[in-house]
Amino acid sequence: MKAISAVIATILMLMITIAITGTAYLYVSGVFGSRTSVLLAIDQRSSCRGNNLFVYVRNDGSNVAGNTSIDITYPNGTIFNSQCFIDQISAGNSNSATCPISSPLLSGFYQVKASSTGSSATGTIYCSPGSTEGGAPPATTSTTTTTSSAPVTDTVGSTSGTNGWNGYIVMTKINASASGTLQTIGVNLQSICTGIEVGIYNDNSGTPNLLLGNSSNIAPTTGWNDVSISGGISITSGNYYYLALEENGGCTNYQNVFPDSGTNPIFYVSQTYGTWNNWSGGSGPVSEAQNMRMTYQ
């Protein structure tokens, strides 16, 4: 009997050990699985230009990050509710939000916090009054980017029709076919004028919104003029942008097209040459598109 009792006791101990081990495994796998399903990080491409913070958030987790809010704390400790959101960030990729900050711009490090269900991340962006380039990178050491392996060029408009918009900034809507960093913006001219500048705006529900970057004055030639754009502007596949042209007199004709459906409309605003601002008080859409292109990698 004693031998049988010892065997039974041994079997019971083994069963209890197996049960405890299984329960612990399920608990640990559940905890760590939930922690890594969404894992946010502030990307080094985040920057300050003008009165806007361009915040890039990376998702290193295995699931899609849903609505992600961006909270901003000023260098003086004031918390600013900028109402910045990113709709979603797919696993292993990054997305961005443009967050306007109220004037006057303070010099120093702005704290940014990205929050989504199950994860949050913090970083810093350096700003200084009058700066139009990217600020100091946030406190992070890794980067996840989704860029194309070779340069990509998206073109809008065709070589039919002529028109001129001297005295205006004219913006043509274009859809990005891939992701990358903007290199150049090009415009196809039929006639030579004394100078042109080009720029790019992001989209807000079908209209131009914030100025992302612009060139300085160049003396153009007939045909394609591809102008370099600095600042590391990120282009995201599937997003709409507006390629902008400003003419400095005498440039009355450039290639454009009048699409039947108005798929690529233009918007325009009267502006002194050489002056660039966020979209405000302009007109459009008008169903015609300038022959322009953007190249990014």
Image: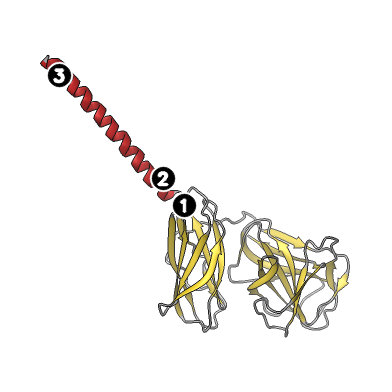
| Residue 196: mark | none
Q: Quadrant of residue 146?
A: bottom right
Tell me the distance, in whole angstroms, between the alpha carbons under discs 1 and 3: 51 Å
Residue located at (75% from left, 68% from top): 172
Q: Is residue 16 left or right of residue 33?
A: left
For label 2, count other residues whose C-alpha is less than 10 Å away and answer few (under 14), some (14-19) or many (20+): few
Residue type indicated by callout 3: Ser
Residue at disc 2, secondary structure: helix
Q: Is residue 148 above or below residue 132?
A: above
Residue located at (42% from left, 47% from top): 34
- Report the residue marked by disc 3: 5
Residue type indicated by callout 1: Val
Residue 286, given in percent of the width and then of the height, sits at 81, 70
Q: Is residue 296 left or right of residue 12?
A: right
Residue at disc 1, secondary structure: loop
Q: Can residue 141 be seen?
A: no
- Report the residue marked by disc 1: 38
Q: Nearer the viewer, mark 1 or mark 3?
A: 3
- Quadrant holding the C terminus: bottom right
| Residue 33: mark | 2
For label 3, count other residues whose C-alpha is less than 10 Å away and answer few (under 14), some (14-19) or many (20+): few
